[in-house]
Amino acid sequence: MKACRCANMIVQSVFVVALVSMSSAQEVSVRKYDGQVSDANVLVRDIRPLSARPMVGEQPFGFALMPKVETPDESWDVVFLRFSLFVGSHRCVYGLDLGVLGGFAEQEMGGLEISGLFNDVGMSSGALQIAGIFNHAHWNFSGLQLAAGFCWTEGAFSGLDIALANKVGRLSGVQIGAFNYAEKGAGLQIGAINFSEQLEGFQIGVININRDSAVPMFPILNFAF
């Protein structure tokens, strides 16, 4: 009897895990080699990258003097308020992030981030970032970036960039600064010098360079669609 009960418990546990896994899946149609769509759909789940180190947990508050000298330690998430007397570093930060000098988020930042010198986010960020010198997103950013020096988003940027110099991988929004660079995208650049490899939109400035435009370089106003 005990063996039967154990077997039933194991089967039930596997069934519950399967249901949870399937809840995050979605049905997609499969195309055969001959180009016809199969009658049967297949359940597909997202494959998510593993973190470089496992998440320990999350805390509502964080306080930091500098990386490695903070509570909780840098492997934790802070989900309400972080204050860094000098520089703070945590896995993810959500909410309000205040730093006298600067702040690091290894993976994600979401909320309001204000630092005296810099803000640096390892992956994606959806926030308002304000820094004395620079804001840097290693992957994507969505929101508003303000800095006295420069703002740099290596991946896709969606929103408003205002700084002395702005640089993004893919623009979907507005850049305002003395120098603006967008590798490609769509939007508006306003500055003394505007440069893009492939931009659908307008450039307003003293020198406007868009290599995808019919006129690659033109003063005052340049555009391409």
Image: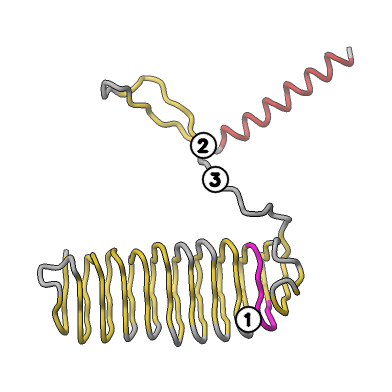
User: Within 10 Å of the Cα at label 1, are there few (<14), some (14-19), or many (20+) other Cα atoms?
Assistant: many
Mark closest to the chain's N terminus, 2 or 1: 2
Q: Residue at x 63, y 29 (%)?
A: 18
Could you tell me how far apart the alpha carbons at marks 2 and 3 are, in whole angstroms? 9 Å
Residue 45 disc label? 2
Q: Residue at x 63, y 85 (%)?
A: 100
Left or right, 5 with respect to 124, comes to right
- Which residue lies under the disc numbered 1? 99
Residue 170 disc label? none
Q: Which residues are magenta?
A: 83-91
Q: Residue at x 15, y 83 (%)?
A: 219
Inspect the image, locate mark 2, and give the three-letter code of the amino acid beneath it.
Arg
Mark closest to the chain's N terminus, 1 or 3: 3
Could you tell me how far apart the alpha carbons at marks 2 and 1 are, in whole angstroms? 38 Å
Which part of the image, by quadrant, shows the C terminus? bottom left
Q: How many marks?
A: 3
Inspect the image, locate mark 3, and give the three-letter code of the amino acid beneath it.
Arg
